[in-house]
Image (tube, coloured by chain):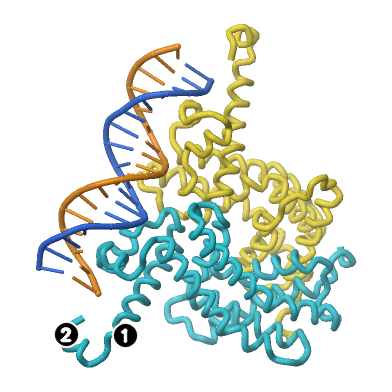
Chain colours: A cyan, B yellow, C blue, D orange
Amino acid sequence: MTPELRSLGVREIALDNSRADILAAAARCFMDRGYAQTSIDDVARSLGATKGRIYHHFPSKGELFAEVFRAGMDMNFAAVKPLSDLPGPALPRWRRMAMVHVLQMMVTKPFQRAVWIGVEMHLAGATTPEQRTVFNELLDYRTRYGNLFRATLLQGRDEGVFRFDDLSVTNQLMFMSLNSPIFWYSPRTGETRAQTEALAARVVAYAQGGLVFEGERAA
Amino acid sequence: MTPELRSLGVREIALDNSRADILAAAARCFMDRGYAQTSIDDVARSLGATKGRIYHHFPSKGELFAEVFRAGMDMNFAAVKPLSDLPGPALPRWRRMAMVHVLQMMVTKPFQRAVWIGVEMHLAGATTPEQRTVFNELLDYRTRYGNLFRATLLQGRDEGVFRFDDLSVTNQLMFMSLNSPIFWYSPRTGETRAQTEALAARVVAYAQGGLVFEGERAA
DNA sequence: GTCTATAGAAAGATAGAC
DNA sequence: GTCTATCTTTCTATAGAC
């Protein structure tokens, strides 16, 4: 940044943008190549920069990844938490939460793929105790997000709109469906918001079908 | 192997077992740590051996991974292909194929996770042209397996038992559901075959619900 | 057929110039 | 705040003993 700009007080903004740029580039790289296979040089190169710039803003590759993970989860919480707090019958609330969740997966795909990678990594590769602590926090964050849906699933079962016996298995199946766009979705050129939402609605409908289907009987 | 045994003609068998042991150990390591984060030393250590043993049987890490991938897909094809060739209405055939597929995911989980990792890797990390060729073969193998289900899905739609508009999206959603046990299933100690099948049946029921649900109308 | 030892490459991280 | 240069570790792959 030039001294002129800094003297105008834009220091914080510039700093934030620099960090945000790195986070977005890192998310893309982690999505494309996975965690271990992504080098800091890869991230830097995708920004037209070198390592020095990354390490000035983030102390380590692990911490950079953790911040990408956190950013992804922050976005999900901000979008879904308000809906999960609303009163009323389970089904319409579930549909709104699911729809917003799926749109999050589509619109912020690189960050959500990083979250997925983080969950898949489990604790493997986290060698030092500090790394483990950070990692456990991230996984806990993700679990708390998942719990936003559990209450509505249980309420829906009580109300007779959902049918399932094992909440954990059902939760896994539901999230696999709702998360799946992070693996196969990519926006068409010139895709409108309505088209994106139509696709998201199909995903939600599929998951809803899984939750309401009277399994064994219909065999 | 001892000269005595070799003189008895068990050379092939011993070689096969050695390779099979390495493949199984490699599959576990790839499942636990992913491809890039798994070192050949990790695989060797999990066998109580050193690298030399691995490199005697496999020319490179990439080739070792490719063989794990192939072994996983071989098992899937052997289990599902005969069912997909059967005549008759789509729904019962789909249910049998789906059930067998899900059981494959559960029983051969390490290999199936390796297949997943391979699909996720896409072409990233495959640097040389030979590697790309091998990799494209693997992905093509996987695509051909997916196609076993496509015909039955289309037939089911014609017969009115499945409802969907986009075959590709539906295929993705279905496989995400049917594959999901590779991420969350682990057998309980002393789990019976009946219990395993009951769990698989729940997964199949969920997917079937997604396929038959009359999406938009039921909102 | 498996081991030890090692060469060579890649990547995380740091130091210091600008 | 970013870059270049470098240290250090880790890992693939190979060579050669047994």
Q: Nearer the viewer, residue A205 or B171?
A: A205
Q: Is residue B158 visible?
A: no
Element marked by disc 1: helix
Residue that carries the numbered disc 1 in the rendered image: A12
Chain containing the residue with disc 1 = A
Mark 2: amino acid? Pro
* Residue at x 40%, y 63% (from the top left corner): A29
Q: CA distance from mark 1 to mark 2?
A: 14 Å
Q: Is residue B145 above or below residue B171?
A: above
Depth check, front residue: A4 or B136:
A4
SS state under label 2: helix
Residue A210: image tag: none
In this view, the residue in front, C7 or B20, is: C7
Q: Does A215 appear above or below A152?
A: above
Q: Residues within 10 Å of mark 2 (few under 14, many from 20)?
A: few
Residue A152 at x, y percent in the picture = 74, 81
Q: Give the left or right position of residue B128, taking residue A186 as reference.
A: left
As shown in the figure, which amino acid type bears the numbered disc 1?
Glu
Percent of width and height locating residue A2:
17, 83
> Where is B71 relative to B121, above or below?
above
**Horizontally, is A174 left or right of A12 in the view?**
right
Instruction: Write down the residue under mark 2.
Output: A3
